[in-house]
Image (cartoon, rainbow, N blue to C red):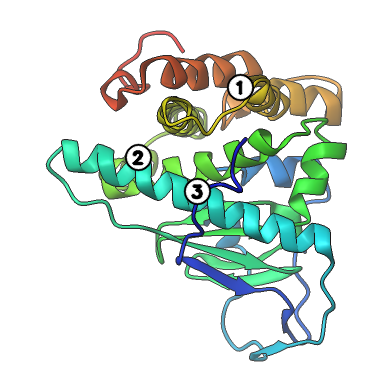
Amino acid sequence: MRWREGRQSENVEDRRGMSRGGMAIGGGLGGIVILLIALLLGADPRQLLEQLPSDGQAPATQSSRPTNPEEEELRQFVGAVLADTEDVWNDIFRQLGRQYREPTLVVFTDQVQSACGVAGATVGPFYCPGDEKLYIDLSFYRELKTRFRAPGDFAQAYVIAHEIGHHVQHLLGTMDQVDSARRRLSEAEANQLSVRLELQADFLAGAWAHHAQKRGVLEQGDVEEALTAASAIGDDRLQGESQGYVVPDSFTHGTSEQRISWFRKGLETGDIRQGDTFGARGL
């Protein structure tokens, strides 16, 4: 991915080294880290973060945490990817006769306070519609490479593009509609809506990749990296690896095959009108 040739977004908020004294993050969310990462790799974080306390905590303080060249390069990378998504989505919204409201990407270390609650690094990247911000601890990219076996810079870019997909859904009102409907449904039915929401975010990530490819940002092998990442975080694969069996009614993001399929559809068409996962009879 030719990210070094692009500009840096001005919408990056660097909170690395900020800490919240005395705060234990992650308790009560379960002990399966791999599932926690997967659940918030684009999920609506309110489903998990609402369980965590967000009031009465010690104020955030800046710690003297040294950085390293690899981490600084990742910081530059996410700024460049965010800038490219801004260019693409501003153009798409303009064609729709709408205005794209650019989100902020928050880079943090260990734990962070958002409008959706407090989260630790183990929950992985997430988007919070309450403050229209994306959150990522850069150490997640190490998890993506080692635990999920999805290396490559475009696999990393896919993660950001998926979260941006949720921001687009928020701006178009889709997230609010799904939230409202989910409250009236059984758990299995609500999960099915979540799957369709996540698959649409994968489609939107693919739509961004389509335009990035036309702009000459992609290099040979980049698409394969993104497809590997999409496959690695399918519900069926994650459940099979963590517990040895799968429970389809509990899926919230879709299978590996579904995630690949919808990302590829967005990549091939680049037309957001083709991404109606809610109206699709088969996923």
Tell me where residue 207 sits by quadrant.
top left
**Residue depicted at 56% across the width and 32% down the height:** 252
Residue 220 sits above or below residue 69 on the image = above
**Residue depicted at 40% across the width and 57% down the height:** 129
Q: Position of residue 278 (x, y in %)?
A: 34, 23
Q: Please state which amino acid type lies under the numbered disc 2.
A: Val
Q: Element under label 2?
A: helix
Q: Please state which amino acid type lies under the numbered disc 3.
A: Asp
Mark number, residue 44: 3
Q: Position of residue 132 (x, y in %)?
A: 40, 61
Q: Which residue is mark 1?
A: 223
Tell me where residue 151 sits by quadrant.
top right
Q: Residue furthest top?
A: 282
Is the N terminus in the top left, top right, bottom left or bottom right quadrant?
top right
Mark 1: few, some, or many residues within 10 Å (few <14, many ≥20)? Answer: many
Q: Earlier in the sequence, mark 3 or mark 1?
A: 3
Q: Nearer the viewer, residue 182 or 128?
A: 128
Q: Please state which amino acid type lies under the numbered disc 1.
A: Val
Q: Earlier in the sequence, mark 3 or mark 2?
A: 3
Mark 2: few, some, or many residues within 10 Å (few <14, many ≥20)? Answer: some
Residue 262 sits above or below residue 165 on the image = above
Q: Position of residue 250 (x, y in %)?
A: 62, 29
Instruction: Determine the CA span between mark 3 and mark 2.
Output: 10 Å
Q: Which residue is mark 2?
A: 178
Instruction: Give left or right: position of 55 versus 57.
Output: left
Looking at the image, do the residues carrying marks 3 and 2 touch, with CB atoms under 8 Å apart? yes
Instruction: Determine the CA span between mark 1 and mark 2.
Output: 29 Å
Q: Nearer the viewer, residue 218 or 276?
A: 218
- The answer to whether one can see residue 106 in this image is yes
